[in-house]
Image (cartoon, rainbow, N blue to C red):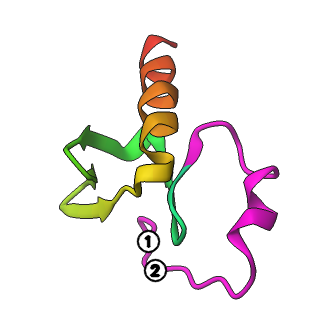
Amino acid sequence: MTTEGTQSFYGKLGDLEGSLPSCFVRIHNRYFINLKYLDSLEKNCAIVGNTALPVSRSYKQSLSITYARYMLE
């Protein structure tokens, strides 16, 4: 989802991971988010605008650390 609408991608997200800017972080096997638009973190969700996106257990700690560093910049 972008400000212009939803974007579809037919490939492996893992292939994108190294080529995205550092403000993008993976939160789930199906999702990356731009930390610039992250409004808050809840128990198992990342709130982006009016949308609650699931955060998987395997990415939760990494997201918390990356978000804290992003907020300090």
Q: Residue furthest top?
A: 72
User: Residue at 80% across / 50% down in the picture?
Assistant: 18
User: Residue at 24% across / 55% down in the picture?
Assistant: 49
Q: Percent x, y for residue 72?
A: 45, 11
Magenta stretch contains residue 2? yes
Name the N-terminal-most of marks 2 and 1.
1
Are the two marked residues, 2 and 1, in contact with CB atoms closer than 8 angstroms?
A: yes
| Mark 2 Cα shell of 10 Å, populated few (<14), some (14-19), many (≥20) | few
Q: Residue at label 2?
A: 6
User: Residue at 20% across / 45% down in the picture?
Assistant: 43
Q: Percent x, y for residue 29?
A: 54, 68
Q: Secondary structure at mark 1?
A: loop
Q: Quadrant of residue 13?
A: bottom right
Left-right relation of 57 to 11:
left
Q: Percent x, y for residue 52?
A: 23, 61
Left-right relation of 23 to 72:
right
Q: Amino acid at mark 2?
A: Thr
> Above or below — where is 50 with respect to 5?
above
Q: Residue at label 1?
A: 1
Q: Which residues are magenta?
A: 1-25
